[in-house]
Amino acid sequence: MAPSRSKPVTASTPRPIRKLLIANRGEIAVRIQRSCRDLGIETVAIYSDADRNALHVRFANQAVALGGNTPAESYLRGDRIIAAAKETGADAIHPGFGFLAENGEFADAVAAAGLAWVGPTAKSMEIMGDKLSSRRAMVAAKVPVVPGTTDAVDDPAAALRIAEGIGYPVMLKASAGGGGKGIRVVPSAQEMESAFSTASGEAQNAFGDGRMYLEKFLVSPRHIEIQVLGDKHGTVLHFGERECSLQRRHQKLIEEAPSPIIDEATRQRMGEAAVAAARAVNYHSAGTVEFLWSQGEFYFLEMNTRIQVEHGITEEVYGVDLISQMIRVAAGEKIDDCVGLVPRGHAIEVRLNAEDPDNGFLPSLGTVRNLRWPGGPGVRIDSGVYRGMEVTPYYDSMLAKLIAFGRDREQARRRMLRVLQELHVGGVKTSAGIALQLLQTEAFITGDYDTGFLERYVEGGREAPKREVTDDLERVAAIVAALHRQRAGARRPARSSQESSGGSNWLRAARLEQHGRSGR
Ligand code: MV4
């Protein structure tokens, strides 16, 4: 519907989107293209040198080379991305997740360039991006938060005083942190001084902000998150929960919807709390409100102001296309037709990462040789992988998302076992094997697992014995990539340094030398 000429163009005036630039890569770029195609919207892809043959480039109506390989040289170059949108006549930019998806300055620059931003306002991002401001907003909105402080704790002495009131163990957290960065468990007063100094210093180095706060430490919580969607006309909906407790070092591996631990009454309460959280920051677009669940109670943890990797399991259970809804919202449309969507069945997602679980989950670099994707009833594969694709140290290791849907949890689980047994990815190691093991553990089958389960399972040596890294070149490349990630301190396992790329280029050149032209 074209905006009315008589009224000024306001934020809520619908503005048709006919061409959309996708400011991302890999499987989420392909996922966004699919929704655009369903909506009759043309797409513009952007790509780095390493992605010149990528699937998202091939699927797009137009593609613009950004040059460079590392995120800083390519997918984080907001100025070049906006220029590409203007040059190609795009009406909107969808950021996907990661990269610039939660960058308020970029969101404002997109709007200032006269383009529609497919995401929330910079203000919503700002409030939720700072953990202390988000906690204050939640307290004001009467959303339950973990018992603790809503102001920064200035020094170890103050931390000791406050922790006495909370009761040990407590958790020190960086206000600028998130996703596991800048947090410390403090078991007793004796450990406070060193924990505070170390954690605050790390936060200052990683985020340029050393402000710390305290929370009561919840033992063995579960990570339950609620999908929300708001439009620009005051409607905010939720689409139930996702269980995301199967994580290792704050990297999710297996997610499911609904959670095996949440009953209907709790689901309604958590949904209402998530909607209240979104309303508290005038949220529109898709977003996720994360909670910790412990002994029947739930507490606000943080809000992710973007679409998330695991959004697909919610789509399967609710029969909704969340990417399309984000685009409609950005165009100023109402989402009333999403009201009352009824969930059915169960969905499980496994993240297919190019990593070697037998070698500390270190990155597995190389060239994807033959590929065999699973299929059949209840199977969805969201992938950016193609035969001949170079897995490089520039980007995170996720190759694809495997989703299995069933009438109930056990059917979904069995279908995911079939998916993992049918799957074949030649040329790189993947997380498929460890996922296949986990889905057959008693803890998973009974749904009785918490956020510490995967670490205990891996540390407990219940996976295959760690093989000695036979290929020194592989070890060096993996170590270089891992060291770079550690040095970069990135929130995402981004590997974007010339050394690590040099490592992989050096690795590739050396391997070609070692094995002749055949490569791996
Ligand atoms: C906690 C917690 C227990 N008690 N806060 C980790 C990542 C960041 N989002 C917050 N995290 C946690 N915060 C209190 N007060 C336990 C964790 C935690 C965790 C949370 C969700 C999913 C996986 C996790 C793994 C380890 C620790």
Image (cartoon, grey):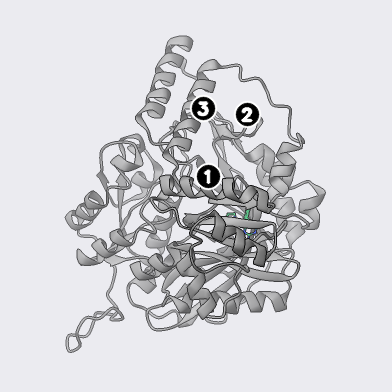
Can you give x and y, in whole percent of width and height, for residue 257 in the image?
65, 63
* Residue on which the image places disc 1: 198
Name the disc covering residue 359, or none. 2
The answer to whether one can see residue 463 in this image is: yes
Viewer can see residue 517: no
Across and down, in percent, residue 339 comes to 53, 81
Quadrant location, the N terminus: bottom left
Task: Please name the residue shown 72% across and 37% down the image.
Answer: 459
Q: Three-letter amino acid code at disc 1?
A: Thr
Secondary structure of residue under mark 3:
helix
Up the image or down, 291 lies above or below 220; here it is: below
Residue that carries the numbered disc 3 in the rendered image:
478
Mark number for residue 34?
none
Dot placed on the residue nearer the N-terminal end, 1 or 2: 1
Do the residues under discs 2 and 3 have CB atoms within 8 angstroms? yes
Q: Secondary structure at mark 2?
A: helix
Judging from the image, what secondary structure is the residue with disc 1 in?
helix
The residue lying toward the viewer, choosing from 258 and 468, is 468
Which one is earlier in the sequence, the residue at label 3 or at label 1?
1
- The single residue placed furthest to the front in the displayed view is 157
Left or right: residue 488 versus residue 398 is: left
Residue at position x 56%, y 57% in the image: 157
Above/below status of 14 relative to 295:
below
Indicate the amino acid at tag 2.
Asn
Relative image position of residue 348 (x, y in whole percent): 65, 56
Measure the C-alpha gap from mark 1 to mark 2: 28 Å
Picture quadrant where residue 118 is located:
bottom left
Ligand 1 within 8 Å of the CB at mark 1: no
> What's the CA distance linking mark 3 and mark 1?
27 Å
Q: Nearer the viewer, mark 1 or mark 2?
A: 1
